[in-house]
Amino acid sequence: MPSSGPRTRVTLKLATSLDGRIATAAGESRWITGEAARLEGHRLRAAHDAILVGVETVLADDPELTARLPGRPVDQPLRVVLDSRLRTPPTARVSHGDTLILTVAEPSPIGTAVVERVEADHGRPSVGAVLSALKRRGVSSVLIEGGGQVAASFLRAGLVDRLEWFRAPILLGAEGRPCVAALALAKLADAPTFRRLSAEPVGDDLWERYDAVR
């Protein structure tokens, strides 16, 4: 794919408690949101060309990262894993099929996934290099699903275009795992800013949608 033209559009999907936690301190996260919210999450997956997670999500949950909609065949998005040190197990569900693993290490085989080395940024895949790799594969939209470090890296770079936030009516407290890791903000004016498009109930949860303010 030519390098000119718009970059890959980035949507960050969050499924959290009311206080922005994605898991308990022990890592329990299934299921924070309800069945209706999870179905909407699958619709979001089906609407994007790729789904992206960090390796910690793979190690914790062994997700399929597929779009599953009842009674409807779906063209499955490309599955993308950011894995700095190639810790994705060959037995993981994402290690087989249409998967791209982006690393800063020397590439080595992991199942049948495609493993590609990209430019590093403080020991992790550079988010700019990640989007360039996706664009070369014709990916026009990517849905980021986890975890907190991945979310923070794209937010720090100002590369999140849309937020899809599902909030469950529970509180996990400060010991819970945050949906966004440290942003290293020096002042309030540096905070990533979004404009709310809608807020609606979905089952017992609240679904909020935001566009980035540039």
Image (tube, grey):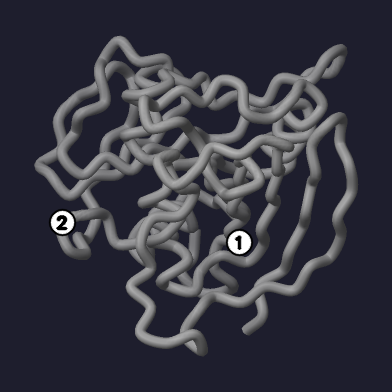
Q: Tell me where residue 36 appears, x and y as whole percent.
A: 82, 26
- The earlier-in-sequence mark between 2 and 1 is 1
Q: Which residue is mark 1?
A: 9
Using the image as rendered, state which of residue 71 and residue 3 is in the foreground: 71
Q: Tell me which residue sits at (10%, 41%) in the image.
A: 106
Q: Are marks 2 and 1 in contact (CB under 8 Å)?
A: no
Side (left or right) of 11 relative to 4: right
Note whether 153 is above or below 187 in the view shown: above
Note whether 186 is above or below 208 in the view shown: below
As drawn, which residue projects farthest toward the left? 106
Side (left or right) of 44 relative to 117: right
The span from disc 2 to disc 1 (Cα, nearest Å) is 24 Å
Side (left or right) of 194 relative to 133: right
Note whether 157 is above or below 210 in the view shown: below
Q: Tell me where residue 153 appears, x and y as whole percent.
A: 38, 61
Q: Amino acid at mark 2?
A: Gly
Q: Tell me where residue 47 appears, x and y as whole percent.
A: 74, 42
Crowding near pointer 2: few (<14 within 10 Å), some, many (20+)?
few
Q: Tell me which residue sits at (77%, 57%) in the image.
A: 209
Note whether 61 is above or below 86 in the view shown: above
Q: Tell me which residue sits at (42%, 15%) in the image.
A: 93
Q: Amino acid at mark 1?
A: Arg
Which disc is residue 123 wearing? 2
Residue 34: name its quadrant.
top right
Q: Tell me which residue sits at (56%, 42%) in the image.
A: 50
Q: Disc 2 on helix, strand or loop?
A: loop
Q: Disc 1 on helix, strand or loop?
A: strand
Q: Quadrant of the C terminus?
A: bottom right
Q: Nearer the viewer, mark 2 or mark 1?
A: 2
Using the image as rendered, state which of residue 7 and residue 186 is in the foreground: 186
